[in-house]
Amino acid sequence: MAAALAAAEHAAINGIHVEAAWSLARRAVRDTCCLVTMDRDTVDQIIEDVDDALRVMPRSESQVFPLHSNRPEGHAPSGGTETSRSQNSENVVRKLKQWYQDSCQICATTLFLPPPRHRYSEAAHIRAREHGGPDLTENMLCLCPNCHVLFDAGAYVLTDDLGVVDTVTGRLQGALERHPWHYINPDDVRHHRHHWTSRNAGARSTGGSTGRGRE
């Protein structure tokens, strides 16, 4: 839709086109919601997420990048204020948790809480921030607190085909749950696995500890 608006002006897609396209799409979503049996709260949350993303998107005439793309070629350019980066990170985490409805991708556990929280989950970086891991859905997993600790400490690693391996027992736990829209960067998966398998092997040979703090 944004591309069509830009094409009509013989221009590259920019923030104004995306905002105009979303305005039309938002109205269509609300109208459709009235015709089907859909949870209105869920629809409103999706709309709010996109609204938040558009607020931090540049509105200049220059070409813009896709919002929080899950493809490697969709990485947004570096730079910007700390506030914008923080807002972008919050949007990414919110989208990730929404995809899985706060269900853990490893053990499928969902923690239910009283209102207003209702459910709880945590966003875990695959490649740790301290190792240059970006705040993108392709580098994040939606996990329960227990699996988050185990993953961050290297007790769980992922295979290239996204199987979950328990490094303590050496057993394959099963396949990682993955939403159809959730692209996971294989380079980040390999970085996490190689970091912890080499570190754990070194610790076993020296009798040292492998633990580290939460991200």
Image (spheres, rainbow, N blue to C red):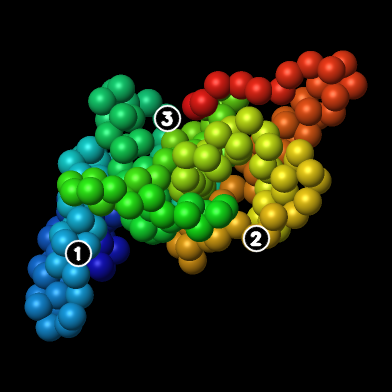
* Badge nearest the viewer, 1 or 3: 1
Report the residue that reaches farthest toward the front: 114
Q: Determine which quarter of the picture holds residue 85.
A: top left
* Badge nearest the viewer, 2 or 3: 2
Which is nearer the eye, 127 or 177?
A: 177
Mark 3 lies on a secondary structure that is loop
Q: Is residue 192 above or below residue 165?
A: above
Other residues around mark 1 within 10 Å, as few (<14) / some (14–19) / many (≥20):
some
- Whole-percent x, y for residue 89 in the image: 35, 36
Three-letter residue code for mark 3: Ser
Three-letter residue code for mark 2: Ala
Mark 2 lies on a secondary structure that is strand
Q: Which mark is residue 124?
A: none
Lateral position of residue 144 relative to residue 120, left or right = right
| Res. 146 visible in picture | yes
- Whole-percent x, y for residue 170 in the image: 80, 46
Q: Which mark is residue 78?
A: 3
Residue topped by disc 1: 43
- Whole-percent x, y for residue 14 in the image: 26, 49
Q: Is residue 7 above or below residue 57?
A: below
The mark that comes first in sequence, 1 or 3, is 1
Report the residue that reaches farthest toward the right: 205
Lateral position of residue 107 relative to residue 190, left or right = left
Distance between the alpha carbons at the discs numbered 2 and 3: 33 Å
Q: Do residues under tags 2 and 1 come within 8 Å of each other at their CB atoms? A: no
Residue topped by disc 2: 175
| Res. 5 visible in picture | no
Q: Quadrant of the N terminus?
A: bottom left
Q: Residue at x 52, y 40 (%)?
A: 146
